[in-house]
Image (spheres, rainbow, N blue to C red):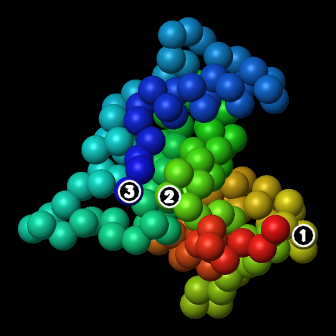
C-alpha cells in the first residue's frame, strides 16, 4: 500500500492555497505540526501485529478526518484533507464514485444535506471540520462512496 509522506501533505496544502487562494506561511504553514506527525505514524501502525486501520476506507478516513479536524495548517485544512484523501485513494487504485451519496447511521444522515455530488462533498467537508462527523462516521461514508479503479468505466 502506498502512503502519503509528510512532505506530500505539506505540498498538497501549498498547492491548494496557490490554486484556490489563502495564506501559506513558509516554510510549512503549520499550526499543529505534531498532529501531522501523529497522522503519518498512525495511518499504517499496528497493535499486536494487526493493523489499527486495516482497510483502505479506514486509512483514507484517517487522512481526511485528522487533517480537517486537527487544524494542522494555518489555512486550507479542508481542501488539503480532501485532496490528501483523494490522492491516497488514487495511489492505491481507488476513486470516489461519480455520484456521491449520503449514508444513515443510527438515524443520523451523513452529511445532513446535499443533493448533487458537489453539494454532498461540500456539506461533508464542512460538517467534518465543524466536529459534527466522527472518525468512524467519516470512514463509513468513505467506504460507501469509493470504488476500486477496476470498476471505473470510462
Q: Which of marks 2 and 3 is nearer the N terminus?
A: 3
Q: Quadrant of the N terminus?
A: bottom left
Q: In this view, does 133 lie above or below 153?
A: above
Q: Earlier in the sequence, mark 1 or mark 3?
A: 3
Measured as percent of width and height from the top left, residue 30 is found at 49, 22
- Residue drawn at (63%, 23%) of the image: 14
Please name the residue that numbered disc 3 is placed on: 1
Secondary-structure class at tag 2: loop
Residue reaching furthest to the top:
26
Give yes or no for contact between labels 1 and 3 (Cβ–Cβ under 8 Å): no
Name the one closer to the observer, 92 or 136.
Answer: 92
Q: In which quarter of the image is the C terminus?
A: bottom right
4 left or right of 137?
A: left
What whole-number distance in Å separates the C-alpha atoms at marks 2 and 3? 6 Å
Please name the residue that numbered disc 1 is placed on: 116
- The label nearer to you, 1 versus 3, is 3
What whole-number distance in Å separates the C-alpha atoms at marks 1 and 2? 26 Å
- Residue drawn at (60%, 32%) of the image: 12
- On the question of residue 132 being in view, the answer is no
Q: How crowded is mark 2: few (under 14 residues within 10 Å), some or many (20 or more)?
A: some
Q: Total marks drawn?
A: 3
- Residue drawn at (51%, 10%) of the image: 27
Give yes or no for contact between labels 2 and 3 (Cβ–Cβ under 8 Å): yes
What whole-number distance in Å separates the C-alpha atoms at marks 1 and 3? 31 Å
Q: Earlier in the sequence, mark 1 or mark 2?
A: 2
Please name the residue that numbered disc 2 is placed on: 92
Label annotation for residue 129: none
Measured as percent of width and height from the top left, residue 18 is found at 75, 21
Q: How crowded is mark 1: few (under 14 residues within 10 Å), some or many (20 or more)?
A: few
Measured as percent of width and height from the top left, residue 140 is found at 54, 76
Amino acid at each position: 500500500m502506498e502512503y502519503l509522506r509528510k512532505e506530500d501533505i505539506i505540498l498538497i496544502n501549498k498547492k491548494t492555497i496557490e490554486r484556490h487562494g489563502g495564506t501559506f506561511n513558509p516554510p510549512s504553514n503549520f499550526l499543529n505540526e505534531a498532529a501531522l506527525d501523529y497522522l503519518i505514524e498512525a495511518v499504517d501502525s499496528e497493535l499486536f501485529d494487526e493493523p489499527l486501520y486495516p482497510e483502505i476506507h479506514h486509512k483514507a478516513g484517517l487522512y481526511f478526518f485528522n487533517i480537517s479536524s486537527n487544524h494542522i495548517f494555518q489555512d486550507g485544512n479542508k481542501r488539503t484533507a480532501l485532496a490528501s484523501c483523494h490522492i491516497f485513494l488514487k495511489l492505491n487504485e481507488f476513486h470516489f464514485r461519480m455520484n456521491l451519496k449520503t449514508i444513515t447511521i443510527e438515524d443520523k444522515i451523513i452529511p445532513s444535506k446535499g443533493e448533487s455530488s458537489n453539494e454532498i462533498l461540500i456539506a461533508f467537508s464542512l460538517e467534518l471540520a465543524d466536529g459534527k462527523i466522527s472518525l468512524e462516521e467519516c470512514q463509513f461514508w468513505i467506504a460507501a462512496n469509493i470504488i476500486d479503479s477496476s470498476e471505473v468505466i470510462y
